[in-house]
């Protein structure tokens, strides 16, 4: 087979399913285009002899048995997209897995361990208020009551939509015992590889995240009649907190990142001193202790600065996810392949969340990144140089060969 040609054909065919008239694509969980995409994957997997099977919730598996062992080497990613997303997030990992495995079977025959593709039902949380529905069901961690009452923005109910596509809850959340390794390949969705002119990222860690919503309360007052000394200005308090925290984050540097992404002053009017600012904090780090230390110190400074300015602060920590290290042996295997094949690579962490973080606590897991042009993702402009996409499939094939043959 012509590896590059096959990758090109598969990306173009799968991208046509759910494509938006304005560019990009929208393939939300349990919609008709989502089902059509999974069925397209079934056909592709069967075209080179894989045995396919859906689980109860709509995760799709394609398998070639091993000659010497029932153990399984698995690769894949998610088939769903964000609304008006790009053509690589998720589906590149599914296409790369099937193409690498097809190439290996054609070149080297039956593997010793089974090779299996997984096309996961959902990762993005872009239709219903739930994320990782696919991988959580795969590892036996999904909670039925988390989705039983939820609906999308049009009012369509999760459970009804799932059943409409012929799927249903798993009777029991079970975990497979045969998975020896899971390797997910994904676009970086950042600009590190591009800036460093590299083609491959060997991912050794998925960063932990803490997210907060903070309400700073002061006193709304007349902008003309309230002297500076008599103000309790929530915007000023926010500005001090934000500027000091970002200075500190810059001083700490990689891999810490800190973002004040949403800021809402009230009443948000030209001639009124702000009486309240609601803002969010998103902080990520690959080391659990460093993440906790940095954010705990920040919480303390928010209270101190608020007190100095005559404000009150209510701090709500609503997401607290620990970093997920990738399996050292598989990371070493990928890196060894990168060295052997003279790939242009570096070892790096992932700042974004991925299915691999759900799977890693259960099975030996690692990830490979390919560059994203300008770091753009979740956007129709999401793009990767075609030769980089092909390099990704090649190193994935080299890695799977090492693991399964
Ligand atoms: Zn993704």
Image (cartoon, rainbow, N blue to C red):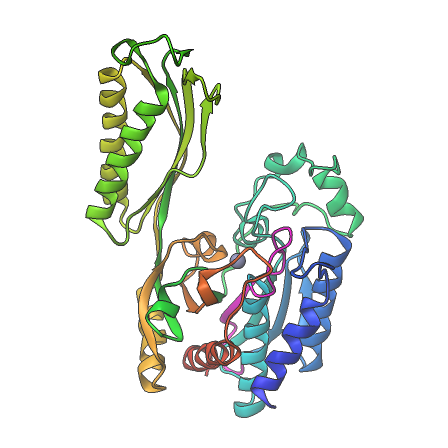
Say whether residue 198 is left or right of residue 16: left
Q: What secondary structure predominates along the stretch shown in magenta?
A: loop
Residue 362, position as x, y percentages in the image: 43, 55
Where's the N terminus, which quadrant? Answer: bottom right
Is there any visible trace of residue 196 in the rendered image? yes
Which residue does the image show at 64% across and 58% down from the upper left? 59
Q: Which residues are magenta?
A: 66-88
Say which of 389 and 63 sits in front: 389
Q: Is residue 292 visible?
A: no
Q: Residue at x 56, y 71 (%)?
A: 116
Name the foreground residue: 227 vs 197.
Answer: 227
Quick check: 105 left or right of 404? right
Q: Which residue occupies the extreme front position in the image?
A: 224
Q: Is residue 394 above or below residue 60?
A: below
**Magenta-span inclusion, residue 87:** yes
Residue at the spot 68% in from the left edge and 65% down from the top edge: 53
């Amino acid at each position: 087979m012509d590896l590059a040609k096959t990758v090109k054909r598969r990306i173009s065919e799968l991208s046509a399913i759910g494509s938006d008239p304005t560019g990009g694509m929208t393939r939300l969980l349990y919609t008709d285009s989502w089902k059509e995409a999974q069925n397209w994957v079934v056909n592709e997997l069967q075209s080179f002899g894989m045995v396919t099977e859906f689980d109860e919730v709509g995760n799709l598996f394609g398998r070639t048995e091993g000659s010497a062992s029932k153990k399984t080497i698995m690769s894949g990613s998610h088939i769903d997209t964000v609304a008006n997303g790009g053509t690589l997030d998720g589906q590149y990992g599914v296409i790369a897995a099937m193409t690498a495995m097809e190439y290996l079977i054609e070149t080297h025959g039956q593997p010793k361990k089974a090779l299996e593709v997984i096309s996961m039902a959902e990762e993005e949380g872009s239709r219903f208020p739930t994320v990782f529905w696919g991988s959580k069901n795969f590892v036996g961690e999904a909670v039925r009551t988390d989705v039983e009452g939820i609906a999308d923005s049009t009012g369509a109910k999760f459970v009804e939509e799932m059943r409409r596509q012929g799927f249903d809850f798993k009777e029991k959340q079970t975990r497979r015992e045969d998975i020896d390794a899971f390797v997910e390949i994904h676009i970086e969705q950042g600009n590190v590889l591009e800036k460093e002119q590299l083609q491959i990222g060997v991912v050794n860690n998925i960063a932990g995240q803490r997210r907060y919503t903070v309400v700073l309360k002061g006193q709304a007052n007349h902008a003309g009649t309230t002297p500076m000394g008599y103000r309790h200005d929530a915007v000023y308090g926010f500005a001090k907190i934000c500027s000091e925290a970002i200075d500190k984050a810059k001083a700490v540097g990689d891999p810490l990142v800190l973002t004040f992404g949403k800021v809402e002053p009230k009443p948000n009017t030209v001639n009124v001193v702000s009486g309240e600012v609601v803002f969010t904090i998103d902080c990520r780090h690959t080391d659990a202790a460093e993440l906790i230390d940095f954010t705990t110190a920040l919480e303390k400074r928010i209270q101190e600065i608020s007190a100095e300015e005559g404000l009150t602060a209510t701090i709500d920590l609503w997401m607290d996810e620990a970093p997920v290290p990738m399996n050292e042996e598989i990371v070493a295997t990928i890196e060894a392949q990168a060295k052997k094949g003279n790939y242009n690579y570096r070892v790096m962490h992932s700042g974004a969340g991925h299915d691999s973080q759900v799977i890693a606590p259960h099975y030996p897991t690692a990830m490979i990144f390919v560059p994203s042009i300008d770091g753009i993702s979740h956007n129709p402009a999401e793009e990767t140089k075609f030769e980089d996409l092909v390099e990704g499939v090649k190193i994935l094939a080299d890695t799977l060969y090492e693991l399964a043959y």
